[in-house]
Image: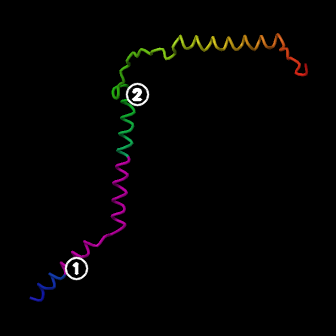
C-alpha cells in the first residue's frame, strides 16, 4: 500500500513540475512565432507590390472629366476694365500737375 501511495505522490510532483513556467522556453517560443509572422508579412508585402506593379490588383479606371471653367468672362472683363481706368487716371495725374488755389487770396 505504501508503495502505491509513493507512486501517486511522485506523479503529483511530476505534474507540478510540468505546470511551472519555464521563461526561457516560453520566450523562445514567442520569438519564433513573431519571427515566422514577420517573414510571412514581408512575403505578403512583396506579393502585393508585385501585383500592384503588374496592374493586376487595385486597378483604377480612368474617367474623362469635363472641367468647367471656374472664371466668369464678364467678371474678368469688368476687373480688367477697372484696372485700365485706374491706370489712365494715374497717368493723367502724372502728366498734368494739379493746380492749387491760393488760400490767401
Residue 31 vs 68, above or below: the answer is below
- What residue is drawn where x is 22% and y is 76%? 14
Q: Are marks 1 and 2 in contact (CB under 8 Å)?
A: no
Identify the colour scheme used.
Answer: rainbow
**Which image quadrant: the C terminus?**
top right
Q: Which residues are magenta?
A: 10-38
Query: Which residue ends up furthest to the right in the rendered image?
Result: 104
Residue 43 vs 25, above or below: the answer is above
Query: Which residue ends up furthest to the front in the rendered image?
Result: 105
Circle number at residue 53: 2
Q: Which residue is mark 1?
A: 13
Q: Is residue 58 left or right of residue 101?
A: left
* Quarter occupied by residue 28: bottom left
Q: Is residue 31 left or right of residue 9?
A: right
In three-dimensional space, the C-alpha distance between marks 1 and 2, rounded to whole angstroms, equals 61 Å
Q: Nearer the viewer, residue 33 or 79?
A: 79
State the SS at label 2. Answer: helix
Amino acid at each position: 500500500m505504501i508503495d502505491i501511495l509513493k507512486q501517486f505522490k511522485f506523479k503529483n510532483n511530476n505534474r507540478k513540475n510540468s505546470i511551472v513556467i519555464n521563461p526561457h522556453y516560453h520566450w523562445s517560443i514567442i520569438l519564433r512565432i513573431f519571427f515566422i509572422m514577420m517573414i510571412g508579412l514581408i512575403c505578403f508585402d512583396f506579393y502585393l507590390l508585385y501585383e500592384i506593379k503588374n496592374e493586376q490588383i487595385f486597378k483604377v479606371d480612368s474617367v474623362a472629366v469635363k472641367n468647367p471653367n471656374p472664371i466668369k468672362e464678364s467678371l474678368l472683363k469688368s476687373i480688367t476694365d477697372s484696372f485700365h481706368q485706374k491706370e489712365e487716371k494715374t497717368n493723367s495725374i502724372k502728366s498734368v500737375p494739379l493746380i492749387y488755389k491760393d488760400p490767401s487770396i
